[in-house]
Image: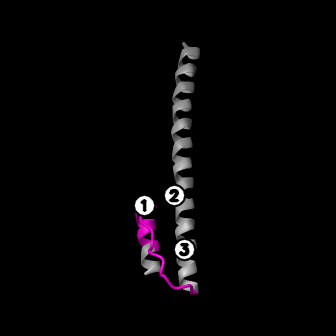
Amino acid sequence: RLSQFINQAIQNKFSDSATLPVPNSKDEVSGLTHDFNLMLQEIRNRLAEVREKTQALEQQNGELNQLNQQLHQ
């Protein structure tokens, strides 16, 4: 189930906010599932940061291109 969920998350490019339900037991699988959910959330947070920074850089690049055109004229 974990493997299927990982593949699904990758196919969705981590855009889905779903997490795996953590079993009520305190065994290793439960701990790994919890850790996986934390890691998945961290990946989503970092991807959001990258998207924001990419958008800001694209805007700055557009502004620089406009200034370059003005300087050439």
Above or below — where is 9 with respect to 51? below
For label 2, the crowd category at 10 Å Cα-Cα, with few meaning under 14, some 14 to 19 and many 20 or more, is some
Residue at the top extreme, as displayed: 73
Residue in the image at 41% along x and 61% along y: 16
Residue 9 is one of the magenta-drawn residues: yes
Could you say where residue 45 lies in the image, as x and y percent from the top left? Answer: 54, 54
Q: Gap between marks 1 and 3, in whole Å? A: 15 Å
User: Badge 2 is on which residue?
Assistant: 44
Residue in the image at 56% along x and 66% along y: 38
Could you say where residue 69 lies in the image, as x and y percent from the top left? Answer: 53, 19
- Which region is colored magenta? 6-27
User: Badge 1 is on which residue?
Assistant: 17
Tell me the SS state at disc 3. helix
- Quadrant including the C terminus: top right
Q: Earlier in the sequence, mark 3 or mark 2?
A: 3
Which numbered marker is on residue 34?
Answer: 3
Above or below — where is 69 with respect to 60? above
Q: Amino acid at mark 1?
A: Ser
Closest to the observer, 51 or 32: 32
Left or right for 51, reference 12: right
Q: Earlier in the sequence, mark 1 or mark 3?
A: 1
Residue in the image at 43% along x and 74% along y: 5
